[in-house]
Amino acid sequence: MGAKQSKEFANEEPRRTMRRNGGGREESLCSAERIRKHATTHFGYSTLSLAMWGLAEAPEELWQLRELEKLNISLNCLSALPPGVGALENLVVLNLWGNQLASLPPEIGRLRNLRVLFACRNRLSEVPEELGSCSKLEVLSLSNNQISSLPGSLAGLRRLTKLNLSHNRVAHIPTCVYGMRGLVFLHLACNRLENIADQIQDLVNLKILIVEGNRIHALPKTLCSLTSLELLNVDFNQLQSVPVEMYLLRRLEKLASHPLDKGLHIVHNPLLKPIKEVLHGGLTALYNYLKPA
């Protein structure tokens, strides 16, 4: 279906160009109507999906559909997102997953109603400061890119509850992340982290922290003040020990192995303390080992 729609759209392009030479704004509006006919109302939201249409560039008429609230242009071949995206000021969800985007335009900061942004699996090396103006953002996924840092302006995303920065080039957790006090879910797996700053204690609402597949040598004691943690994944790091205060994380109910299981994930670390025999006894044995006499 996607391929057919893409072909139909491509066949219309010569006609649009010919008519636009003599028709101006009227023909542009007609072109916008041809896109609008693919929009639907889904759960009360004006929704348009151009996913898997084989688009090398977004049709310029798309930015005239200002009523759109959910736009999916994932799994195309887009190398750039035009500034026109800023005209879609009613957008609540924007899905850019699986393209070839090297950057996001500053105009994305005009999307003041945006609550969900998926920009994973692109070629992003940075994020514009203007994204910090999207103060209603609740979910931000930037996984599988080439990002090494985030602008400080993102600290203002107070409503953000889920941040996915996995599979990037992050060597230090960006300072702005510690300002995102509403975070419940933080995914930093498969980066280049060597440590976690003491400021992690500021993320008091955090329930899920995933830092597997990094180069972390030690966990800060302040991590153990995050008593809401239900899943802590530190698999595949360079940990030789864990803080003695770890027993304070009472919501980590077990030593977990399945990636989706809640609990403490701590395999494939060169642990010297506690020794593996202690871990074989499960989380209770670990906590008994750590608790002061």
Image (cartoon, rainbow, N blue to C red):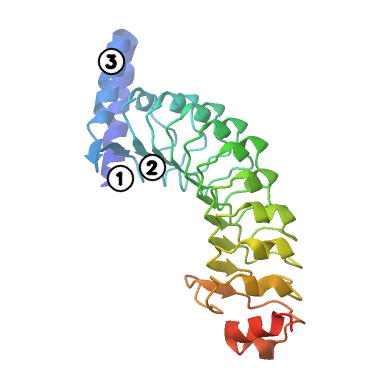
Q: Position of residue 279 (x, y in %)?
A: 64, 86
Residue in view at x 62 percent, y 66 percent: 212
Front residue of 192 and 121: 192
Left of 243 or right of it: where is 91?
left
What secondary structure is found at the residue carrying circle 2?
A: loop
Q: Residues within 10 Å of mark 2 (few under 14, many from 20)?
A: some
Which amino acid type is marked by label 1? Ala
Which amino acid type is marked by label 3? Glu
Q: Residues within 10 Å of mark 1 (few under 14, many from 20)?
A: few
In the image, which disc is placed on residue 27? Answer: 3
Q: Position of residue 43 (x, y in %)?
A: 24, 43
Residue 270 sits above or below residue 70 on the image: below
Mark sitting earlier along the chain (1/3): 1
Q: Is residue 236 visible?
A: no
Front residue of 260 and 94: 260
Q: Are marks 1 and 3 in contact (CB under 8 Å)?
A: no
Q: Residues within 10 Å of mark 3 (few under 14, many from 20)?
A: some
Label 3 vs label 2: CA separation? 24 Å
* Residue tagged 2: 54
Residue in view at x 68 percent, y 47 percent: 174
Q: Are marks 2 and 1 in contact (CB under 8 Å)?
A: yes
Mark sitting earlier along the chain (2/1): 1
How many dots with numbers? 3
Label 1 vs label 3: CA separation? 25 Å
Residue in view at x 41 percent, y 45 percent: 74
Q: Quadrant of residue 153?
A: top right
* Residue tagged 1: 3
What secondary structure is found at the residue carrying circle 1?
A: helix
Front residue of 38 and 280: 280
